[in-house]
Each structure stands twice: as structure tokens, then as C-alpha cells.
Image: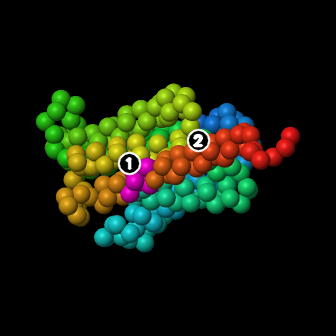
Amino acid sequence: MCPELFHVGPFTVQAYGLMMALGFFAAGALTAWGFHRRGLSTDTVYVVLIAAVVGGLVGAKLNYIIIEPEFRLESLLNGRGFVWYGGFVGGTAGVVTVLLVTHAPLGPAVDAIAPGLAVGYGLGRIGCFLNGCCYGGASGLPWAVAFPLGSPPTNLLVHPTQLYESLASFGIAAVLVFVVHSQVQRAGSLFAWYMIMAGVERFLVEFLRNNERLWAGLTLQQLVSVGLVLAGIVLLMRLRVVSVDLQRVALDEDLPQCGKRS
């Protein structure tokens, strides 16, 4: 809707770039808060954020290169052409690597990161809306939008799927902070719930977009979403099994040992 916000001398401030920067800042602030809330080292959080940003950007760009049939070398250097799932995988890999190297507790750390991921993604999608990309299919709904000259759907009303995802992501962040976190959860479960909810959100929104259908009427993004949801479910089940085993061990230790004199 407004890809260029304003000019500062010879420089143009792009809406997409600004919202991406705000997304990284908000995610970083929430992650730092999450680290402090869990008693984790605040020194580690800055290294984690750098790893998340670098890994996320590299992963998002590589994912774009893989799926873009008309890839050009200059796409490596421009500010467009990022795919969220690639960024998620790359950012997660970078964060996990740093946590393992620094010997930080993995479960609490990824739980601290989850709400920030959701908020950062929501802000990034607002950037997509302002930039006029990642829109949905044709729509006759009252809130359908037509993007300005230069965007493919200039004269066509389409679903503002960017805003759908943005609102959903903010909702996911709220659920993680105020609902899931308030329950007794084993470390790592908050991140697992984020994977499940983010996967479901993207899976549903894809039905309103015109991406290529690859298998069983599903897009690549939907297939990846299914994998993300399944991974989150497996992680939750694994954490539950470990929790039950630990409870049994504690119970066995509390029981009196028969056959021993006291």
C-alpha cells in the first residue's frame, strides 16, 4: 500500500525494511524479558539474538532461492525475496547452535524466544502489506483491498492475508504469554505450542492465497506447516513422557525401601 515511507537525503526508507527492523527489535526485547523472567543469563541473550537474525536472514534467502524459478544473482543482495519458513529453520539452527556452545539450558531458552518470534512475524507481515506482496486471492469481502500501481493485483480486490497472519500471530503471542505460560509446563513446551499454532495458522491462510498446489491440493507452505505441527506435537509428547518418567523416579525415591534395616 505504501512501499516507500519517506526520504532522508538520498536514502529512501522502505516500509518493508522498517517493519522488519521493528520486528527484530520487538522480538529481541521480548526474548530478553523472557530470559530475565526465567533467570537465564542476560549476557547470552545478545549472542542468541545475533544468531537468530543472521541464521534467519540466511535461511529465508536460501529458501527463496530454492523455490524461485527465475532466480537472479542480484536477488542475493536486494531487500526482497525472503521466505518465512526458511528463516524459521535458519534462525532456529543458529539459536540452538549458540545455546549448545554456551551450555545454556535449551528448553527454557527456546521458550523465552517463542513469544518474540510470533510478534516479530506479525510485524513483518504488516511490512508485507505495506509493500504490496504476499497478498491473497480475489475477494468480494468488505475489507478486501486493491494494491497500488506496481503491484500485480492493482485493479483486483484481494484478501489482505498479510493482515490475517499479523493478527493471528499477535494472538498466538498473547496465548503463549498469558495462557500457556500460566499453566504448569515442562521447559520446551511453550516453543512446541508455538510450532503447532504457527503451523495451523499458516496452513489455514494458504487456502486464501494463490500459491502453486503441489500435492493433494496443498501448497509447499501447507506441507511444511503440517511438518511443523507434527514436530510440535511430537515434542510435546516427548516432554510429557520425560516428565512422567521423572515423577516416577521421584516417587520411587520417596517410597520406603523394603528389606533394609533402619
Can residue 215 be seen here? The reply is: yes
Percent of width and height locating residue 132: 31, 46
Q: Main secondary structure of the magenta part?
A: helix
Q: Are marks 1 and 2 in contact (CB under 8 Å)?
A: no
The quarter of the image holding the C terminus is top right
Binning the other alpha carbons within 10 Å of mark 1 as few (below 14), some (14 to 19) or many (20 upward) gives: many
Q: For the view shown, which residue lies furthest in the right direction?
A: 262
Q: How many marks?
A: 2
Residue 197 picture quarter: top left
Q: Which residue is mark 1?
A: 199
Q: Amino acid at mark 2?
A: Arg
Q: Amino acid at mark 1?
A: Gly
- Residue sitting at x 67%, y 55%: 99
The quarter of the image holding the N terminus is top left
Percent of width and height locating residue 102: 73, 56
Residue in front for this viewpoint, 217 or 75:
217
* Horizontal side of residue 1 vs 233, given as left or right: left
Binning the other alpha carbons within 10 Å of mark 2 as few (below 14), some (14 to 19) or many (20 upward) gives: some
Q: Which mark is residue 100?
A: none
Which stretch is magenta?
227-233
Instruction: Report if residue 231 lies within the magenta region.
Output: yes
- Residue sitting at x 34%, y 66%: 67
| Mark 1, secondary structure of its residue | helix
Q: Which residue is mark 2?
A: 186
Can residue 60 be seen here? The reply is: no
